[in-house]
Amino acid sequence: MTYEAAFAIAALLITCQIVISYNNLNRVSNFPSRMFLVMVVNNGLTALTGVIRWAALRYLDPCPGWIPMACSMLYFITHTLVILFIFLYILSTIKVWRELSWWVKCFILVPICITMLVILTNPFTQAIFYYYPDGVYHRGSGILIIYANFIYYLALTDFILIWYRRSFSAMRRAIFLLILTIGTGSAIVQMFIPDISVEVCACSVCALILFLFVQNPKERIDGELNVLSSQAFSERIKYDLLSGKRFDIVGLLFPELSEIEHQYGADSSLALLHEIVSYLQSLGEHTRIFRVERNCLALQIIRPLPGETEEVIRDIRRRFGESWAAGEKEVTTGVRILHMLLPRDTRDDQLLTGVVNRFAKTGKEERVMTTLDFDLESIGRRRKINGALIRAMENNNFELRYTPVYSQAVERIIAAEVSLRFFDEELGYVYDDELFRFAQRSGHVLQLGELIFEHTCRLIRREKLDEQGLSFLAVSLHPAMCLQYRLIDRLREIATYYEIEPGMICLMLSEYTVSTATQSFKQSVTELQKTGVRICLEDYGSGFTNISSIFEMPFSVLKINRSVIRAALKNDKARITMDSTLKMARELDMMTMVEGIDDEAYFEMIRDMACDLAKGNFFYEQLVEDEFLRVIHMKAGGEETL
């Protein structure tokens, strides 16, 4: 057996295995999956032509000249299309074909059309290949057009991976680069050694790698309920909106699911969901079912007839008025419903997804909800912030802000709280609270937290703030950061690198953060506090108040929420409560801080209280770095002012 036959048979076997596995596993039809299947089948046809050509030349004597000629023609047609399909597959993971402008489509398709024209005219021009009368194959100078086509789409693919790098996970980028490397290497080998037909086999290996690590159909199927997943929901909705299809979305939220699970067990709640899904599947063959959250399903009704969706909703409400079989139990559960008419309500797929996600978390109405029940501007801003945050992370486009902290004992600024913001041309300034809320969802919260901490340490060392009369700089640790592995170790490493005195750093934890922190995190914070780092319990009295928060961790500073001091100014009982809290903290050897001192009335109120530190607009608002440095350089008498 020749090398050509061996590689072709190997490629054919791999292709068959992929197609069989694909059909057994995949249940979601979308453009990337269809493009992947077309690519695999096309490469299988290429391998098949190689096997037929080898068998004809070996076992037919004499071999009719049209057989190898036809096989070679099909080989070049299908093999040339493979690189196009690989490019389209990678592109389709971030862009739907309908999103592309006509000139971009032309930029993509014109080269392949020209190459196909050259291949189809080869029987008349013999530019790419021809056969001698004795059946010996020979390549013409036109073969360079095939390789030029390969280089063109290889360059386009590299451009996509670079330009849209933030849209690919690190693993996907690595896989795509691996298959491009394998494909390029095999093309170089076959260019110089034509008898070793390794390209087809290399393409099959690349397809196998994609199937195992990227084109995973199970990601689009919810493993528990065997319905479409939230990822499939996003992909399907985007495609259908761009296609201009008319469809309705019916969201179903089951608010009592957690209670049922707590009362009867996880098996019963899962059995209940299976019973609900089975019922929903009986509503019609033109209905797709997605699980967008643990206790929320979404139905997509394709091209509904007038009144059809309303009838479905009425039937659902009627059915939920009856009991369900949850394993061996009979239970009743309520349902909250969202109804959206697409594309009338919106043509923005991310806005639609945002509405469904918001419904899954905040749906409280017994009536059928619509898009009018949601703040679309806020949801749209969330989508824009996600994109702006990624751009700011890539360009390091952040600005630190400093809120000075006043000491009543020495009557000057002795500390500051550090916060972060960035500027976006469309959104304007995005500030700390909103920034971290979205960073938690995008997975950038730890990176942002480390960025603030490192910039703070760098400023302390560069400006020698400990020699300027500054006691500490305070940095907030947000809830999602506390769940990150080795967070405290990483912060300790940064402080050690900049040779920062531990007492110059204050880590602020809200009561909510403390309530969500793991035991290992609390132990790490305790160990960090023993080295001299200050730990502040902030937002005390914000609504998450639990007296145990004060003694669960070794806090050295207690920061009273601004809502408490607002109430204390207007209500004598609130004032007494606040004063008692401050005295209690002092007796526990904790420094006390109040925020929200925005005018003289608040300042006069805290003068006689057991309050060590204060901050608010009465002293200074948030300052940029240069302004902040001017403040801390002022002596007690104050030689300069802002």
Image (spheres, helix red, strand yellow):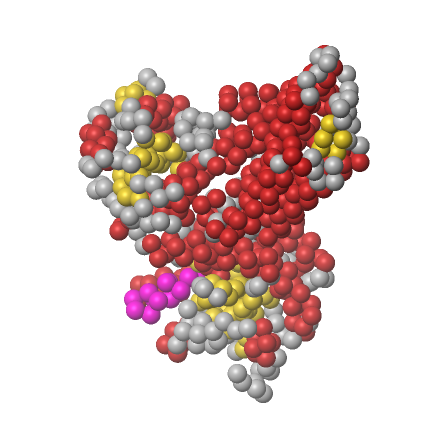
Q: Nearer the viewer, residue 32 or 252?
A: 32
Q: x and y percent of residue 129 in the render?
A: 71, 33
Q: Which stretch is magenta?
A: 560-571
- Identity of the residue drawn at 42% across and 54% down: 382
Answer with left or right where residue 142 lies relative to residue 386: right
Answer with left or right where residue 165 lies relative to residue 406: right
Which residue lies most toward the bottom here?
639
Q: x and y percent of residue 80 in the render?
A: 63, 36
Residue 567 magenta = yes
The quadrant of the rendering that contains the N terminus is top right
- Identity of the residue drawn at 74% across and 37% down: 140
Q: Nearer the viewer, residue 313 or 150?
A: 150
Q: Main secondary structure of the magenta part?
A: helix
Give residue 27's quadrant in the image: top left
Which residue lies most toward the right here?
193
- Above or below residue 453? Residue 28 is above
Q: x and y percent of residue 354 in the render?
A: 38, 47
Residue 298 magenta = no
**Is residue 480 visible to the viewer in this orientation of the structure?**
no
